[in-house]
Image: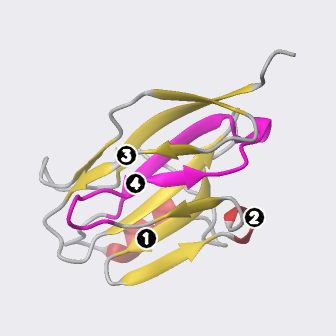
Amino acid sequence: MTPLFISVLLAAMCLECRAQKDNVLQAKGEETAAAGGTVTLHCLYNTSSTAPSLFWYKQDGNNSPKFILSRVSRDDGNTEDEFKERFSSTLDSSNRSVPLKIQKLQLSDSAVYYCALQPTVTGNIKTLYKNLWSKDNRILHNIH
């Protein structure tokens, strides 16, 4: 029997980050793993913020990216209910990393995964969030 493989593409984004001081890096562009297994997607970040907020999103097909979880310095952050059982992450400020671990892999996990760093906003924060989030704060929009 041929094993079923899950393919995961990684993409990094930094929402309105200043210069190159604030950024995220997902060095490995693609991960492949067997169904039922576990994969860890790595994300490194640099920021001048003393309390960084990092996010993971999943985008499959032509759909908009879907929020998976957030991790905030000095806080556990939150995880969407549909991902709580199999998706986990810990913000490691000493290594400046926020890896995403996916367990019990399923074919439906094949997608592009985005690691994102919340911006350090000095301007109009209401405009920023109006442009990024839908009314229910679940779907990311208009990322340039």
**Image quarter of residue 133:** bottom right
Query: Callout 4: few (<14), some (14-19), or many (20+) C-alpha neighbours within 10 Å?
Result: many
Q: Secondary structure at mark 3?
A: strand
Closest to the camera, between mark 1 and mark 4, is: 1
Residue 103 on the magenta segment: yes
Q: Secondary structure at mark 4?
A: strand
Query: Callout 2: few (<14), some (14-19), or many (20+) C-alpha neighbours within 10 Å?
Result: few
Q: Which residue is mark 4?
A: 116
Residue 28 spot, x, y in % from top left? 39, 30
The mark nearer the N terminus, 4 or 3, is 3
Residue 114 versus residue 16: which sits nearer the camera? 114
Q: Which residue is mark 1?
A: 71
Q: Which mark is residue 13?
A: 3
The mark nearer the N terminus, 1 or 4, is 1
Residue type at numbered disc 3: Met
Marks 2/4: CA–CA distance: 20 Å
* Disc 1 to disc 4: CB gap under 8 Å: no
Number of marks in the rendered image = 4
Closest to the camera, between mark 1 and mark 3, is: 1
Residue type at numbered disc 4: Ala
